[in-house]
Structures are given as C-alpha cells and as structure tokens.
Amino acid sequence: MSSRSGSVGGGSVGGGSSAGGGAAVPLAVLLRREVASERTASERPELHSGLFSQAKKGEDFTFLKPDCERVPGVPSSSFSAFGLFDGHNGNGAAIYTKENLLNNILSAVPADLNREDWLAALPRSLVAAFVKTDKDFMTKARSSGTTVTFVIIDGLVITVASVGDSRCVLEAEGSIYHLSSDHRFDASKEEVDRVTESGGDVGRLNVVGGAEIGPLRCWPGGLCLSRSIGDQDVGQFIVPVPLVKQVKLSTAGGRLIIASDGVWDVLSPEVAFNCSRELPPEHAAEQIVKTAVQSKGLRDDTTCIVVDIIAEKNNSSMPLPKKQPGIGVFKNMFCKKKSSDSSSHADREYVDPDIVEEIFEDGCALLSRRLDSEYPVRNMFKLFICAICQVELKPNQGISVHEDSSQPGSLRRWDGPFLCQSCQEKKEAMEGKRRSQDSSKNSE
C-alpha cells in the first residue's frame, strides 16, 4: 500500500495535473496495479476453517463468514471475516457485537474504493466500528461486556482488531506471530496509568488482614480487562478502542488460531500449534480445546477457531502492499533474506514471495490519533461525516476530534475529522473528561 496525494476511490488518481499540484501517477504503475488487481481476484488463497467450543457459562460466541463481499454482487471484492466474542456478566454484549460489528465496519469504509485503498482504510474503519458498536450497545444494557477478536482476510492480507484477552496467533513459515495483545491490567502498566488518570481505581482484591490477592482489577466492578465492548457499569475508561495489526503473508500461507482465554490461560501458542499440527481445521480446533480442558478442567467457556490459509505454491506474482508511512507503527516483520537477482526495484515491490510483512500496527487508545484525517492515509474519508457513527454533519455542526473541551482554545480544533455531539461526549467520557466536567458541575 502506498500513500496517496491525489483523490481516491471513485476519483482519478493519474493522467494530467492534479488541482493540488501533486505529481501524476506514472502509467506503468497504473498498469501494474491493474494487472495485480486482476491477478488478486483470480488467485485468492483457499480458506478452510473449523470451530470447537465447550461451554461453562454460555457466554462465548463466534462469527465465521468466509464469503463476504465489500461490493455486493462483485466476486472480486470478496473477503472473509472471523470473530470471537468472550462475554462476561451476561451474554448481551457478545451477542450484540456479533450481530452488528461487521455491518458497522463496512459502513465506516468509504464507498467505491479499490482493493488497495480498502485495505488501507480498514485500520481506521475498525476503530470507528468498535467505538460505534460500544456506544450503541450502551443504550441497551449496562452490566454486560465482551472481549472481541475480529479477523478480516483479503487475499493474503490479514487484518486483526482486538480488545480484551482473547487472542489471535499466526503460524507461517515455521514462526509464530502474535496478531493481538492482552488488554489485562497485569499485562500493561501503560493501561493501568491510562485508566487511573481517567478516573478509574485499579488494584487487587483486598481480603481480611489487608492482604491483596488475584489479578489487578478496575473498581468498582472488579474487571481485570482495560479494554472491552460494554461494561458501562465499570466505567467508560474501559475503552473499546482496538489494537489493529495488518500483515501480508507470503505465498507459503499459514494457520490462524483464534481462541478465548479458556485456551490461552492453559496453553502457550507453541503447544496449541504443536498439539494440532497436520490436523484439518475442525479437528485441530477440537484438539486444542480438549487439550486445554484436560489440563485444568472446564473452568471457563473455552472456544477455538482455526483457519488455514492455503496459497498456490507457484503463486509468486501476488502484489505485496507497500508499507505506509504515517502515524502508526510500520515495520518489516520476520523477513527472509534472498539472494540478489537482476530484477528491478519496481518489480521487487510487487514480487517477493519469501517474506511475511507487517503492514500496520497501532494500539493507542486516543481517538484523536486513531481517527486522524491522515491515519493511515489522507483524503479518503469524507470530512462532514461523523467519523464514528457516520451521520451527516452540517459544516457548523461537527466537533473536531482534536477538540478538548477541558482545555478551551486547544490546538487544531478546526481540523477534521469531525464528530457529532453524542460521539464527542462518548470520546470525552472515555478519556475521563466528561466525568471531570460532571463532577465540577455538581460541586458548584
């Protein structure tokens, strides 16, 4: 994927001068992109998936939809989606998120994008969709919450968004890659600091005699997760802003394991892959769950999804998305060195079957960063649409995502993207500013 200076989506990206003075895209690049797009449509890898679960509370829910289309009726726009939702304090949040998250993701993606731009738009669209799902659910219930690990596979590009402690791990070319991160207070001092600075109280359970036991939790409520969807009764500083990772597999393909903490509290990724190796996905998922349960008993809902991504062995011509410069973290990941050859630099940008590349990663909890107009590419999202709930805004109605009502006159208040009033209030509540304002009003 590359950054863009011209218009995107349905607009022209090359041929003639741009109104903004940007350079025209060379014809050779346009032709390469067109050929690459046609190849991608016909050379998508095969996906095989399997699911197995053992229930203790009945709060784990899953989503497996291998045949989605971002443009209805256009097979070349197909992608696959898999999700795991580990509910707590009831199953309401898990069920609601399962039923609404994908629609919210697609609604947040601008229309008429080509595949390259669709993949570039996903990181911001996933953030908006997670926050919208959380905001909408909170109008329906207070006490339920859920972890979310949501995976979108388009060709050999895997995009994962996650909150909570369910995990997605990938095995490819003999290495294991973690595509999610545990949002547990015990796992991140940074998350502890964020929540306490926003008004939360984080500590261990106190017992008779003053001793502290168990994991770090947020009080009131005792939730050990710093991010989730739902959990309004704990506090809105338990945010729904996901870690997003996007990677491009090599043509060797790979295997994904998406599982709830009922698996990961018992098994390491290495053990999970080893105990299920060479089994088809449905049997692999069953073996992983049974191995976890046999080790320590069925203490919690224990769920596993296995997805095999099988690419053509001779498919060495699938385009490799370029790393994006920008706000997020972009870096090569587990690259295999190749012997030098006579191919040109331009050719190597599109042909490199021997690397697994990380295209994008960001886990920041700040919406002002995650929804920024240049994140991860500019000129893709409409300015006068709420960046979270997608309602249309009049020019004088939107509130800049950079606006900080606790600091009047803050910088960039005139810059987009913009939020509607209710989404701005949601943002401030997540950052602890709405709580501070309400407290100050009550003290007057």
Image (cartoon, grey):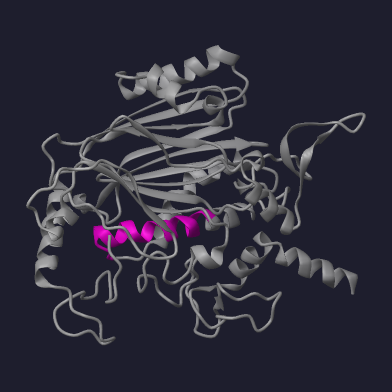
Could you tell me which residue is drawn at 12 percent across and 54 percent down?
38
Q: Is residue 96 above or below residue 294?
A: below
**Residue 40 inside the magenta-drawn segment:** no
**Residue 236 at least partly seen:** no
Could you tell me which residue is drawn at 25 percent across and 82 percent down?
22
Residue furthest out toward the front:
340
Quadrant where the image shows the C terminus = bottom right
Residue furthest out toward the left:
342
Q: Quadrant of residue 375?
A: bottom left
In screen coordinates, is 45 left or right of 237?
left
Could you tell me which residue is drawn at 30 percent across and 67 percent down?
3
In screen coordinates, is 321 left or right of 317?
right
**x and y percent of residue 153 in the render?**
32, 44
Magenta-drawn segment:
112-130
In screen coordinates, is 107 left or right of 254?
right
**x and y percent of residue 138 in the render?**
64, 53
**x and y percent of residue 34 in the render?**
13, 61
Nearer the observer, 73 or 154:
154
Nearer the observer, 163 or 3:
3
Quadrant where the image shows the N terminus = bottom left
**x and y percent of residue 25 in the render?**
17, 74
| Main SS category, magenta section | helix
Q: Is residue 167 above or below residue 9?
A: above
Nearer the observer, 417 or 170:
170
**Residue 266 at least partly seen:** yes
In screen coordinates, is 425 left or right of 26?
right
Q: How many marks?
A: 0
Could you tell me which residue is drawn at 31 percent across and 59 percent down?
118
**Residue 119 inside the magenta-drawn segment:** yes
Q: Quadrant of residue 198?
A: bottom right
